[in-house]
Structure formats: C-alpha cells, structure tokens
C-alpha cells in the first residue's frame, strides 16, 4: 500500500511563490516516476509536471518556465517549486505515483495524495 501526503499549499499573491512537497511511504519510490496534477474550480484534473526516477522532468505548457519539479529519493519526497504564480494557477494540487502509460494522463497513475489547495487571488 502506498500513501502520499502533500503539503505546502496556501494563499499567495500574484507573482509570489510556493513550494509543494509530497512524501511517499510504502512503495519503491525511487524506481517510479512521480507526477503533479491540479484541479481548478469547475475544471477537470490536468497534468502539471512529472519527474522520472532518474530525474527527467516534463511540464505542461501553462507552467513551463515558472514551475520546477524535483525529488529526493532518500527522503522519498517530490517537490514542486512554483514561481510567478497567477490567478489561473488556483487549484487543488495532487501528487501521484506513475503506473504505466503516458505521463500526461491521470489514468496512468495509480496512487494519489489527498491534495493541497493553492489560491492566487486576482
């Protein structure tokens, strides 16, 4: 069984920064890609970023250049550094463990955290 616990969300003004963390337990964390997704109010869950076990990163176009994903396999933690935040970044952010298939689809992930709220007022 895998448990993921996210933290670091909050309210931040436009242009500000937040760093999300996601700590995993119960799985071979270092061998699996980890993803970040988000779900804004009234929207579907969407891909944000992913990082493979070897550290290869991928981002959605909407966050590329502003967000950075990283991981510490010893601490079993994946991070999402979010800079230059915009009101449209407001969402619940989820981390997930990749199972198989494309990194860009939520159906490719088999374990999810509970989510952490990020709010950027307009």
Image: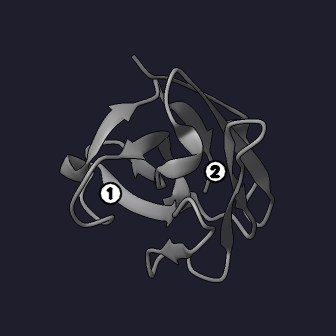
Indicate how the structure is coloured in the image: one colour
Query: Residue 120 has which mark?
Result: 2
In which quadrant is the N terminus drawn? Answer: top left
Dividing the picture into quadrants, the one containing residue 11 is top right
- Secondary structure category for the residue under label 1: strand
In which quadrant is the C terminus drawn? Answer: bottom right
Are circles 1 and 2 on residues that touch, CB within 8 Å?
Answer: no
Closer to us: 48 or 12: 48
Q: Mark 1 or mark 2: which comes first in sequence?
A: 1
Asked whether, in this view, residue 47 is left or right of residue 59, the answer is: left
Mark 1 crowdedness (10 Å alpha carbons): few <14, some 14-19, many ≥20: some
User: Which residue sits at x=49%, y=74%?
Assistant: 59
Real-space CA distance between mark 1 and mark 2, rounded to the nearest whole angstrom: 17 Å
User: Which residue sits at x=47%, y=45%?
Assistant: 91
- Can residue 44 be seen here? no
Dividing the picture into quadrants, the one containing residue 55 is bottom right
Is 109 situated above or below 62? above
Q: Position of residue 121 (x, y in %)?
A: 63, 49
User: Which residue sits at x=26%, y=43%?
Assistant: 42
Closer to us: 91 or 103: 103
- Secondary structure category for the residue under label 2: loop
Q: Position of residue 49 (x, y in %)?
A: 49, 64
**Label 1, on which residue?**
46
Asked whether, in this view, residue 65 is left or right of residue 90, the answer is: right
Q: Position of residue 97 (x, y in %)?
A: 42, 42
Is 101 situated above or below 93? below
Is 88 situated above or below 121? below
Asked whether, in this view, residue 71 is left or right of residue 17, the answer is: left
Q: Position of residue 45 (x, y in %)?
A: 29, 49
């Amino acid at each position: 069984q895998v448990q993921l616990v996210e933290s670091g969300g909050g309210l931040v003004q436009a242009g500000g920064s937040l760093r999300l963390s996601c700590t995993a337990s119960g799985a071979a964390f270092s061998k699996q890609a980890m993803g970040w997704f988000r779900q804004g109010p009234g929207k579907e869950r969407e891909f944000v970023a992913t990082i493979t076990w070897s550290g290869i990163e991928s981002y959605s176009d909407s966050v590329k250049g502003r967000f950075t994903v990283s991981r510490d396999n010893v601490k079993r933690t994946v991070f999402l550094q979010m800079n230059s935040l915009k009101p449209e970044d407001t969402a619940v952010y989820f981390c997930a463990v990749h199972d198989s298939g494309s990194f860009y689809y939520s159906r490719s992930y088999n374990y999810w955290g509970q989510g952490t709220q990020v709010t950027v007022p307009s």
